[in-house]
Structures are given as C-alpha cells and as structure tokens.
Amino acid sequence: MTDSVILVGFMGAGKSTVGRLVARRLGRCFVETDDMITAKEGRSIPEIFTERGEAHFRALEDEAIDLLALKGGDVIATGGGLPCREGRAEALRALGTVVWLRGAFDTLYARALAGGDRPMLAGRRRAEVQALYESRVPYYGRAHVIVETDGLGTDQVAARVCQALRHREREAS
Ligand code: S3P
C-alpha cells in the first residue's frame, strides 16, 4: 500500500490548510480525522465534546486511525490531540510519513484562538493551554520529519513539507 503523509501538530499549526496544499501538489486525496469523526457522528466537534465528553471524542479518534489503516496514499491532517496518547504515535508512523508542523506557542495560540470554536481552549487560561502544548511536544516529536512554520505562509510550509518528503524518498532509495 502507498504510504500516507500524516500531518501532526498543535491547534493553529495550519495542518488543514497546509494538508490541502500538499495533497494538491502531490495529486493525493486529502483527509481530516476531525471530518471523519463529525461525518460518522453527525455532529460538530464542539457538540461531541459537550454532549459526549472528551473521552468519547478520543475513542472516536482511535476508530479513525483504524479506518485510515485500511487505505493508503492520502494526505491526512490530524486533530491536535490525536497523536498524544500512548500507542498513537506508533499507529500513525505505521501509516506512512509523519510530519510535525512545529511553531512557537505564542503564534499557535493566537491562531488557534482566532480561528473557530475549539473545545480544548474553552475555559482554559493561556498558561493552561501552554502547559497542554508542552505536555504534547514529546508526542509530536515522534514524527519522522519536523517542518518549522514560524514566519512562513502556508504555501511556503507546504513547499517545505514536499521538499522534506522528496528528501526522505531520495534517502530511502
Ligand atoms: C483538539 C484539536 C482539534 C480537534 C479537537 C481536539 C486537541 O483539532 O481535534 O477540538 O485536542 O488539540 P485542530 O488541531 O485542528 O484544532
């Protein structure tokens, strides 16, 4: 099966936008784990958190990972918390090349606050979100490739992801 490209990183890292651009550049399908979950549940992520709780959402993430294992070759944008549980990093690495879109916390936080309704930010002070970010860094760090996003536009980040993938392919051949 063709390897997938899996984008991981904190909320606000640009996984969805960059993922779409990378998919277009590579001529691959684009998949978002959050979309898989909302399609299955028939409700939004904030609704799932409010009505069923975070534990249920995390169980749905496990199901999404199992489904992703059935097909290959996609560009996959994961939710910010998806890789951050025991065994998940390994499950993602088994799907293909895992790319961490890394950025400074300040930038990610500002972007995450500005864009959309994010249940993990609701009721959390900045310092608590920063602690969450720091607790997740070791999980993101299990990616095959790290792409720095600070100071770059999404097109530039997508170009860097593709460059890193080409580099890995050359190394492997
Ligand atoms: C989450 C991030 C969200 C979404 C859910 C939980 C998290 O995705 O999966 O709200 O735990 O960080 P984005 O990273 O796309 O915001």
Image (cartoon, grey):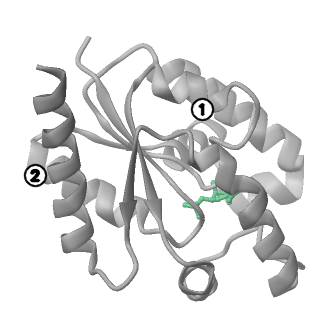
Residue ID for mark 2 = 25
* Direction from residue 119 to residue 149 in the image, left or right: left
Bin the neighbour count of mark 1 within 10 Å (Cα to Cα): few under 14, some 14-19, many 20 and up.
some
- Residue beneath the point at 89% across and 50% down: 53
Task: Please tell me whether mark 1 or mark 2 is closer to you in this view.
Answer: 1
160 relative to 164, above or below: below
Could you tell me how many numbered marks the image carries?
A: 2
Amino acid type, callout 1: Ala
Residue ID for mark 1 = 89
Q: Quadrant of the C terminus?
A: top left
Q: Is residue 84 visible?
A: yes
Please, which residue is most extreme toward the front here?
171
- Residue 64 figure quarter: top right
Callout 1–callout 2 Cβ contact below 8 Å: no
Q: Quadrant of the N terminus?
A: top left
* Direction from residue 173 to residue 68 in the image, left or right: right
Element on which disc 1 rests: helix
* Direction from residue 63 to residue 75 in the image, left or right: left
Q: Position of residue 39 (x, y in %)?
A: 54, 42
- Residue beneath the point at 70% across and 43% down: 84
Q: Could you say which is closer to the camera, residue 55 or residue 143?
A: 143
Bin the neighbour count of mark 2 within 10 Å (Cα to Cα): few under 14, some 14-19, many 20 and up.
few
- Residue beneath the point at 80% across and 85% down: 126
Of the four image quadrants, the one with ligand 1 is: bottom right
Alpha-carbon span between mark 1 and mark 2: 25 Å
- Residue beneath the point at 42% across and 23% down: 95
Q: Is residue 81 visible?
A: no
Amino acid type, callout 2: Arg
- Residue 154 figure quarter: bottom left
Q: Position of residue 117 (x, y in %)?
A: 66, 75
Q: Earlier in the sequence, mark 1 or mark 2?
A: 2
Element on which disc 2 rests: helix
